[in-house]
Image (tube, rainbow, N blue to C red):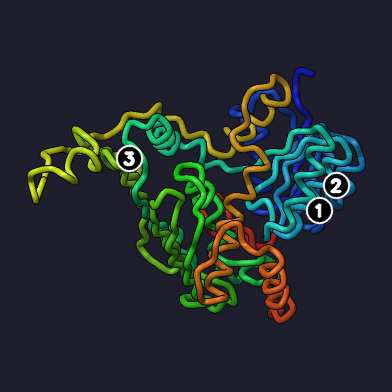
């Protein structure tokens, strides 16, 4: 097989972007051969925009059952991810699924079972793992150069959203349609990076305020306190209501710290570990004279097409994936834990009580309000383009 035949399920903002990237000169060893969407206006866009040899189907199930491709990219609303992933795997297709892998962790188990039984590749679109700065942070942390982590803090509020954004889709920002707000829509990448870099927390206490800055029923402002095995702690802050926002990740370790902000990675390194060199020292107020250095990276940040290229190369040549499908449960577990802690108004331990979370989420879904709105798609510059796509 010289090229992998790809199908894209879902032609909204992200699905249409995947089509564009697959057809670009940045794509390697792949061919866009089919697409699917439930909406006629999106199928009309596909027929008018994509090459003539790209087949257009009325549903993801129809595309999967047609046998017209080797693998699919799934880019549909969150609740549908597990169903389509399982259906594709059971029909012998490889799957690259958009984040999050599901809305709640209970949904993930049958997906992983289907992946194991099928023997096919199941991967996730955690494109932020391709960012050179985060890759370098992981390399430094994994090397042990700075010693064990003591504390982490991440303020990630630079994705401001207006009310127009939330009104642009009938499914957006509802418990029934999306299953959550900033934690489930914007944060999956950061929650994945958090566990990828720092490990899984064992206890979380969170405040998730619903509709604080917007007329929505789900959370748009979150502050969480995290505890890790070994005693390290962390703070995670996310919001779609801050303008201008901040994206600053700091990880403090026994022999220094890393700070990622504004696309740069700074490192402070102590001449010796704090625990053995300063804590019991003769100086009551030690202030070692250290200056931050900007850490060099390879400068590469391929994002979505980087994940897709790795997915294709893994299938064709056995090279590593960016993110294995089974890893998706970690970020989702953190997200679910933050929701659950906020709902119960108390700390929760990880892994969470999955049955309890599912029941509480279902109660919110049953009372979720219906939105009478015309779906709008945004272009790559985030301007509204109308209901096409």
> Mark number for residue 190?
none
Bin the neighbour count of mark 3 within 10 Å (Cα to Cα): few under 14, some 14-19, many 20 and up: some
Query: Mark 3 and mark 2: span between their CA atoms?
Result: 42 Å
Q: Name the one closer to the observer, 110 or 86.
A: 110
Residue pointed to by mark 3: 264
Residue 343's place in the image compared with 278, above or below, is below
Q: Is residue 241 left or right of residue 48?
A: left
Camera-nearest label, 3 or 1: 1
> Mark number for residue 87?
2
Q: Name the one closer to the observer, 382 or 238.
A: 238
Task: Give residue 40's position: percent from left, percent from top.
Answer: 81, 57
N-terminal of the two: label 3 or label 1?
Answer: 1
Q: Is residue 47 visible?
A: no
Identity of the residue drawn at 59% across and 49% down: 330
Identity of the residue drawn at 79% across and 33% down: 120
Identity of the residue drawn at 8% across and 44% down: 282
Residue pointed to by mark 1: 83
Q: Secondary structure at mark 2?
A: helix
User: Are discs 2 and 1 less than 8 Å apart at CB?
Assistant: yes
């Amino acid at each position: 097989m010289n090229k992998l035949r790809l199908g894209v399920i879902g032609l909204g903002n992200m699905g249409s972007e995947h089509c564009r990237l697959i057809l670009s000169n940045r794509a390697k060893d792949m061919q866009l051969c089919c697409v699917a969407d439930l909406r006629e206006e999106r199928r009309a866009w596909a027929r008018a925009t994509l090459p003539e040899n790209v087949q257009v189907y009325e549903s993801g199930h129809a595309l999967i059952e047609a046998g017209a491709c080797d693998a699919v990219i799934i880019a549909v609303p969150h609740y549908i991810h597990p169903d389509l992933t399982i259906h594709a795997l059971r029909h012998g297709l490889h799957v690259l699924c958009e984040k999050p892998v599901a809305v709640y962790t209970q949904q993930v188990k049958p997906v992983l079972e289907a992946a194991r039984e099928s023997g096919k590749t199941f991967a996730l679109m955690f494109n932020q793992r391709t960012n050179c700065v985060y890759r370098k942070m992981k390399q430094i942390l994994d090397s042990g150069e700075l010693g064990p982590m003591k504390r982490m803090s991440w303020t990630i509020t630079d994705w401001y959203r207006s009310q127009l954004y939330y009104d642009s889709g009938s499914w957006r920002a509802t418990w029934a349609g999306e299953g959550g707000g900033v934690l489930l829509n914007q944060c999956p990448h950061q929650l994945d990076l958090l566990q990828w870099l720092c490990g899984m927390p064992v206890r979380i206490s969170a405040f998730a305020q619903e509709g604080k800055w917007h007329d929505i029923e789900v959370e748009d402002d979150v502050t969480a306190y995290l505890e890790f095995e070994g005693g390290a702690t962390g703070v995670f802050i996310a919001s779609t209501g801050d303008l201008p926002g901040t994206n600053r990740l700091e990880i403090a370790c026994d022999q220094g710290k890393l700070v990622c902000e504004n696309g740069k990675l700074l490192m402070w390194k102590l001449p010796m570990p704090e625990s053995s060199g300063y804590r019991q020292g003769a100086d009551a107020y030690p202030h070692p004279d250290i200056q931050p250095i900007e850490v060099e990276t390879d400068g590469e940040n391929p994002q979505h097409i980087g994940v897709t290229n790795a997915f294709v190369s893994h299938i064709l040549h056995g090279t590593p994936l960016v993110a294995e499908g089974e890893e998706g449960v970690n970020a989702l577990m953190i997200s679910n834990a933050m929701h659950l802690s906020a709902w119960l108004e108390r700390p929760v331990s990880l892994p969470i009580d999955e049955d309890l979370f599912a029941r509480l989420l279902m109660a919110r879904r049953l009372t979720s309000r219906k939105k009478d709105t015309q779906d709008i798609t945004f272009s790559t510059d985030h301007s509204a383009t109308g209901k096409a796509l």
